[in-house]
Amino acid sequence: MPAYRGRFAPSPTGALHLGSAAAAIFCAAAAKQAGGALVLRMEDIDRPRVVPGAAEAILDDLAWLGLRWDESTDLGGPFAPYVQSERLARYEAALDDLAARGLVYYCDCSRAEIARAASAPHAGEEGPRYPGTCRPFGMQKRDFRRPPAVRLAVPDDDRALVTVHDRVLGTYTEHVGDVTGDFVLRRGDGVFAYQLAVVVDDVHMQITDVVRGGDLASSSARQILLGNLLHGTPLGSTLGASGRLAAPFAPNPTFAHVPLLVADDGSRLAKRDKLMALRDHRAAGSDPRALVRAIARAYGHDLRDAEAPLEALAETLDWSRLPRESVRVSTILAHA
């Protein structure tokens, strides 16, 4: 396997928008610069939110931009399937492993109950920190008030102190227990949580580098913690040529969080906003190379009139040039 394995993992919940396109472009440039492999995985685990035809449209939009993959949903590869809804058995096995070690428990608390808890300070967009109300019951079956979720019992020792290496945000340390508390791995409706699915997939697919949108930066510490807990298990190991279990693959990738696109007043953009979707630019007859150049320029890389902007970005990519704050969408639209 190449020393560098990057991945782009969109969710087919709608049209591919400019913010996701920016992450995909830098993901592809980083893999090309490193001479590594580029993987496309479709994260469709939340089936009620999946839009019919969106996965195929996303692939078309990415191909229009000029992006090519070494492994993907349509090409296949050594770690197929590359669609999360076809990988449920792996997530179940991960939960079973954690349960066998006493690291998960049932929780039937409502959001309102968690918010009312005196020891539950708010933790950003994802709501209040969970205070561990149901932790003492473990996986004990009881008279649940509602279908229970399964939470990770974040270790009380130093394992919860996690260091994140981010090419854009720098290196920082976070105590997962203090910031988010025990987080959900499977929802009460039976849907596996993003945090679990993405870690199991990244470990299994031997992903070394993750380039994604800045809105997911708050997930990094939790995912590293979970990867550490699964490290050394069959899920976190690779099979050698003989088929025997080889040395475990280090589960912790290096991250690069591409700053979010926002409106000119700083407010968050919606997918329905004008010219946010790549399909709008395609319908308008835009030159994909011009759009790639415009995105690169907004993120600190002026490719001027490069005829092959993706190749030019791979040659000049410097993470230190990326802004640390959000990017105004007008800076892209003005040059697209």
Image: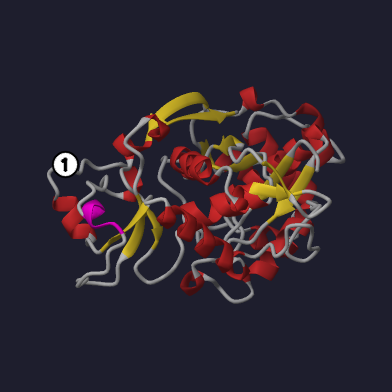
Residue 137 is one of the magenta-drawn residues: yes
Asked where in the image residue 250 lies, by quadrant, the reply is top right
- Decide whether residue 131 is among the magenta residues: no
Q: Residue at x 44, y 53 (%)?
A: 98
Image coordinates for residue 226, horizontal then vertical, percent: 48, 45
Which span is picked out in magenta?
134-138
Q: Residue at x 79, y 46 (%)?
A: 289
- How does the figure colour the protein chain or chains? secondary structure
Report the residue at 27% width, 45% height from top. Answer: 129
Q: Mark 1 = which residue? A: 119
Q: Is 275 left or right of 178, judged from the image as shown? A: right
Is 170 or 87 nearer to us in this picture? 87
Disc 1 residue type? Ser
Q: Quadrant of the N terminus?
A: top right
Picture quadrant of residue 314? top right
Residue 12 visible in the shown view: no
The answer to whether residue 78 is above or below residue 267 is below
Location of residue 115 in the rendering, given as x and y in whole percent from the top left corner = 19, 51
Return the x and y of residue 63 as percentages of the image width and height.
Answer: 78, 58
- Determine the main secondary structure of the stretch shown in magenta: helix
Between 153 and 162, the one lying in front of the other is 153
